[in-house]
Amino acid sequence: MGSAGEEIAARFLERRGVIVVDRNVRVGRDEIDLLVRDGQVLVAVEVKTGAGRDSRPWENFDDLKRARVRRAAGALGIHRVDLVAVQVHRGGATVRWLPATD
């Protein structure tokens, strides 16, 4: 479900004028799901996906995961980390973009 969520998140961001630069960027043992350009700013995006309208995928972006994404982003000189939470359900998907969660 993770790769489907990433695809939904990428399309969601692109419809809002964000440019997807790369996906699944490995930095040592860490990974950035999406690397995007929002205007002039390079942004690391973590995507969390849950099944069902009652899922709360944003809650899975815990302190440990946040630290790992920040570390990877910092190694690339990126100072902004966003979260995109995708809830996949029978009627489609609901997407929440939480900019600058760091």
Image: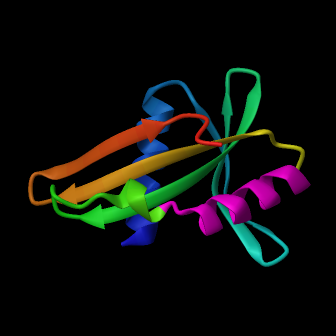
**Residue 93 percent location from the top left of the image:** 23, 50
**Is 81 included in the stretch rendered in magenta?**
no
Q: Nearer the viewer, residue 84 or 37?
A: 84
Determine the residue positioned at 43% across, 43% down. 11
Indicate left or right for 58 with 87 as reference. Answer: right
Q: Nearer the viewer, residue 25 or 66?
A: 66
Q: Which residue is situated farthest in the bottom direction here?
A: 29
Q: Is residue 42 above or below residue 76?
A: above
**Is 72 included in the stretch rendered in magenta?**
yes
Q: Which residue is situated farthest in the top direction here?
A: 39
Q: Is the magenta stretch mostly helix, strand or loop?
A: helix
Q: In this view, does 83 lie above or below 37?
A: below
Q: Nearer the viewer, residue 63 or 32?
A: 63
**Residue 51 percent location from the top left of the image:** 23, 67
Residue 102 falls in which quadrant of the image?
top right
Q: Which residue is situated farthest in the left direction here?
A: 90
Residue 41 falls in which quadrant of the image?
top right
Determine the residue positioned at 70% across, 67% down. 31
Indicate left or right for 18 with 31 as reference. Answer: left
**Residue 86 percent location from the top left of the image:** 34, 53
Determine the residue positioned at 33% across, 43% down. 95
Residue 24 in view here: no
**Residue 44 percent location from the top left of the image:** 68, 47
Q: In which quarter of the image is the N terminus?
A: bottom left
Residue 83 in view here: yes
Determine the residue positioned at 25% across, 45% down. 94
**Which color scheme did the rendering employ for the protein?**
rainbow
Find the magenta span and give its range.
Answer: 61-75
